[in-house]
Image: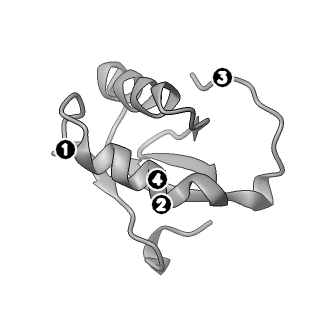
C-alpha cells in the first residue's frame, strides 16, 4: 500500500487516521502528501494511521486539512500533542 522508504520508525509521527479500508481515500491521502514532497507510511487493519517524519508533520497536517480531494468524514487529523493516537 505505501511506497517503501528508508526511515527509522522512531522518527515517525501519526498525523491522521483513516477510519476504514477505503482504497480511494488512502490513495488520495498518499497522492496529496507525495505531491508536496512528503513521504508517508499507511498501514492498518481496522483503522489506518498516516505516519510521516517528525519534520514533515505540521506541513502534512496542513496539506490534509486543506485538501479538497480527501473525504474528511473518513480522515481524522491528529493534532500535535494528541496522546490518544500515539504509538
Query: Which residue is label 3 attached to?
Result: 3
Residue 41 position within the rendered picture, expressed as x and y whole percent measured from the top left: 61, 38
Along the polypeptide, which appears first: circle 1 or circle 2? 2
Q: In whole angstroms, how far apart are the C-alphas of marks 1 and 2?
A: 18 Å
Residue 64 position within the rendered picture, expressed as x and y whole percent measured from the top left: 33, 44
Count residues near mark 1 (Cα–Cα under 10 Å), then give few for <14, some for 14-19, many for 20+: some
Along the polypeptide, which appears first: circle 1 or circle 4? 4
Say which mark, if any, is on residue 64. none
**3 and 1 marks in contact (CB < 8 Å):** no
Q: In whole angstroms, how far apart are the C-alphas of marks 2 and 3?
A: 21 Å
**4 and 2 marks in contact (CB < 8 Å):** yes
Along the polypeptide, which appears first: circle 3 or circle 1? 3
Count residues near mark 3 (Cα–Cα under 10 Å), then give few for <14, some for 14-19, many for 20+: few
Residue 51 horizontal side relative to residue 32, left or right: right
Residue 62 position within the rendered picture, expressed as x and y whole percent measured from the top left: 35, 53
Q: In whole angstroms, how far apart are the C-alphas of marks 3 and 4?
A: 19 Å
Circle 1 or circle 2, nearest the eye = 2
Q: In whole angstroms, how far apart are the C-alphas of marks 1 and 4?
A: 17 Å
Please name the residue shown 83% across and 51% down the image. Answer: 8
Query: Which residue is label 1 attached to?
Result: 72
Front residue of this view, candidates 38 and 19: 38
Query: Which residue is label 4 attached to?
Result: 59
- Dot 2 falls on a residue whose secondary structure is helix
Please name the residue shown 60% across and 26% down the image. Answer: 2
Along the polypeptide, which appears first: circle 2 or circle 3? 3
Amino acid at each position: 500500500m505505501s511506497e517503501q522508504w528508508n526511515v527509522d520508525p522512531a522518527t515517525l509521527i501519526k498525523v491522521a487516521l483513516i477510519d476504514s479500508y477505503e482504497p480511494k481515500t488512502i490513495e488520495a491521502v498518499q497522492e496529496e502528501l507525495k505531491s508536496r514532497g512528503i513521504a508517508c507510511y499507511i498501514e492498518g487493519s481496522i483503522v489506518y494511521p498516516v505516519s510521516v517524519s517528525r519534520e514533515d508533520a505540521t506541513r502534512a497536517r496542513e496539506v490534509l486539512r486543506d485538501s479538497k480531494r480527501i473525504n474528511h468524514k473518513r480522515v481524522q487529523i491528529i493534532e500535535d500533542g494528541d496522546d490518544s493516537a500515539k504509538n
